[in-house]
Amino acid sequence: MSYETILTDIRGTSDLKTGVITLNRPKAMNALNDQLMDELGCALMGFERDDTIGCIILTGSEKAFAAGADISAMKDYDFQKVYGSNYISRNWETIRSVRKPVIAVVQGVALGGGCELAMMCDMIFAADNAKFGQPEIKIGIIPGAGGTQRLPRAIGKSKAMDMVLTARMMDATEAERAGLVSRVVPLDKLMDEALGAALVICGYGQLSVMAAKESVNRAFESGLSDGVMFERRIFHSLFATADQKEGMDAFLQKRAPNFVNG
Ligand code: HXC
């Protein structure tokens, strides 16, 4: 499959592979238009279907993860078009059906829809030059890809309101302190750090990786009792797998486990 607005690559060793997707509209700071979101969805689902891939990294350029939804495309949209064509829902949400871990690797700006896309990933690693923001209010709209929901869950109501209402940007240090990103790494070391984390994840039993992601995500979708019950049932189900036996045997025999993803 050849793409015009993204690049794809497969990194890692022959049995521990990570799919890397790089947003690539450099002249528009990776502004997210329909073509890009369609191609991104296609690439994500391609890696999802590939059994040899254990983890996915989504990144942009040094200057921009993404500067938001494409304003030049959006400026002529009217209500009939966005509602009728299910704008955003029709292709931005594909990432939510990916069951493998997706790491957002953010360098430069992640603004508006760019910040929202990063938040749809499972974790965010940021370069020390990263800046996050939801500046939609400056152009007469509000976040429309989940920003008003995921940002307060990540950083709390007060900071989320501050960002959404004033449109100020948050640097990487503040973003880590606030809980939006999991690691801040010098720009030149960021991709190695992310590939290292991906390799670690690829080394685990992939059923338990999938179950862990599904269970953590449930925390955002349900109340505590329902969430804990969901986790408990998935936890129980992993005792049906060979990898549970192998992981525990290997620990007790003081050797590395040999997971079979089954
Ligand atoms: C379309 C964009 C763009 C965007 C930048 N560009 N952001 N084009 N949509 N979101 C284009 C510029 O028009 C310019 O094109 C080129 O990229 C470089 O941008 P500059 O502004 O010249 O660069 P700089 O001065 O370095 O400023 C960078 C910037 C600024 C701070 C990122 O571009 C900016 O504020 N961009 C808009 C950020 C924003 O409002 N995002 C939210 C969008 S709304 P030319 O052709 O002039 O070189 C949104 C809705 C989400 O995301 C809800 C649904 C998902």
Image: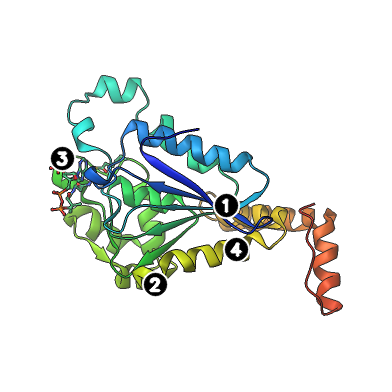
Q: Is residue 26 left or right of residue 117?
A: left
Residue 106 in sight in this render: yes
Seen at 28% across and 40% down, the residue is: 69
If you read the primary sequence from the N terminus, does the residue marked by circle 2 or circle 3 appear first? 3
Tell me: is circle 2 under 8 Å from ligand 1: no
Measure the C-alpha gap from mark 3 to mark 1: 33 Å
If you read the primary sequence from the N terminus, does the residue marked by circle 4 or circle 3 appear first? 3
Q: Which mark is residue 140?
A: 3
Measure the C-alpha gap from mark 2 to mark 4: 17 Å
Badge 3, how many Cα within 10 Å: few under 14, some, many 20+?
few
- Element on which disc 4 rests: helix
Q: Which mark is residue 172?
A: none
Badge 4, how many Cα within 10 Å: few under 14, some, many 20+?
some
- Element on which disc 1 rests: helix
Seen at 56% across and 61% down, the residue is: 198
Q: Are marks 2 and 3 in contact (CB under 8 Å)?
A: no
Please state which of residues 21 and 205 is positioned toward the viewer in this rendering.
21
Badge 2, how many Cα within 10 Å: few under 14, some, many 20+?
some
**Label 2 is placed on what type of residue?**
Val
Q: Which mark is residue 185?
A: 2
- Element on which disc 2 rests: strand
Give the residue pinned by disc 1.
218
